[in-house]
Image (spheres, helix red, strand yellow):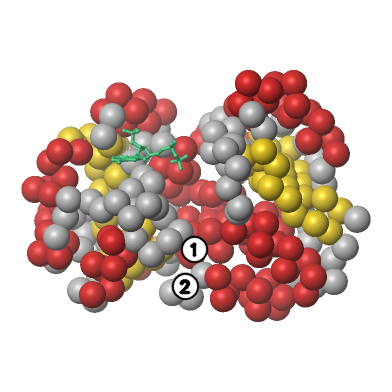
Amino acid sequence: MKKFGLLEYPHKESLSKQVFNEYFKKAHIDAVYEDIVIVPDNFDDEINKYIDSYDGLNVTVPFKEKVIKYVEPVEEAKEINAVNCIFNNKGYNTDWKGFYNSLNSSILKEPIVLVGAGGASKSIIYALYKMGIKKLFLVNRTVEKAEKLRKIFLSKIDIKIESFDHLQSIIRSFKTFINSTSIGMFGESFDLEARDLSNLSLIYDIVYNNTPLQKIAKENNIKCIDGRTFWYHQAVENLKIWNIYTPEIFNETFKTFARGE
Ligand code: ATR
């Protein structure tokens, strides 16, 4: 039996575990997908054991950067400085590809504001650069983290940093609003009202669950792409890398989990 898994901390029943296992069953693939919890202090001692004994791995918070030195990162993963998929000792980043494939460039109107400067944000910036976007406005609660991202992508995309506290007053000047923070995961909301968002043609909210932001978008007929759609598109990329991708079964299994498809 093949073994796949998601390296994570702390433990959270993942959507991946649920859906990948269903996919294996439907596609008659003799495999299992597990959530693998590693206590961060033990990461360096334990990581090789998992890389060696699993046929494919996903990596999530907080290990996407830490894992790089234990694998051979492909060029894109190196440029993003984050690995979220492992196969045969190689480290891939399927987040950027998922974001890239989830968007048809015709619906991505500029100017674009991206909120968040964590791990997910890096893959999104890289995807925007690959889509040919030359300029981006970046907002983050902790300005230093936004500064760090600006420097990482200096040669690729022009990043202008704006203050998180001014989001409400500047949001009207944008056409696309991308949320890459976890705001909304536990029901928290941005300090934004429907009228602040009325100029937007697209809201992309990477949070999986139905957030207050997604709710406002739907109520006001603003095109909204959510975290499940993002997740759906990166999931395909993992299966392709692991050589177990069957399009029909994938569509049948994963589409029900990706709202808005
Ligand atoms: P991920 O890898 O999923 O992006 P992360 O690296 O922990 O996760 O980043 C989380 C992002 O959400 C960060 O941009 C964080 O802002 P800070 O850099 O200031 O910490 C943002 N975030 C989380 N909760 C937030 C909140 N309540 N208000 C504003 N930003 C928040």
Residue 144 pos. (x, y %): 30, 24
Q: Is residue 32 left or right of residue 81?
A: right
Whether 90 is drawn above or below 101: the answer is: above
Q: Secondary structure at mark 1?
A: helix
Q: Secondary structure at mark 2?
A: loop
Say which quarter of the image contains residue 18.
bottom right
Residue 152 pos. (x, y %): 41, 28
- Residue 254 appears in view: yes
Say which quarter of the image contains residue 155.
top left
Instruction: Give neighbour class at mark 1: few <14, some 14-19, many 20+ (Cα, 10 Å).
Output: many
Label 1, label 2: how far apart the Cα atoms are: 6 Å
Residue 45 pos. (x, y %): 74, 21
Residue 195 pos. (x, y %): 10, 64
Q: Amino acid at mark 2?
A: Arg
Q: Are marks 1 and 2 in contact (CB under 8 Å)?
A: yes
Residue positioned 15% across, 38% down in the render: 165
Q: Is residue 48 left or right of residue 227?
A: right
Whether 131 is drawn above or below 81: the answer is: below
Ligand 1 occupies quarter? top left
Q: Which residue is mark 1?
A: 228
Residue positioned 34% across, 28% down in the render: 145
Front residue of 144 and 153 = 144
Instruction: Give neighbour class at mark 2: few <14, some 14-19, many 20+ (Cα, 10 Å).
Output: some
Q: Which residue is mark 2?
A: 259
Q: Amino acid at mark 1?
A: Arg
- Residue 68 appears in view: no
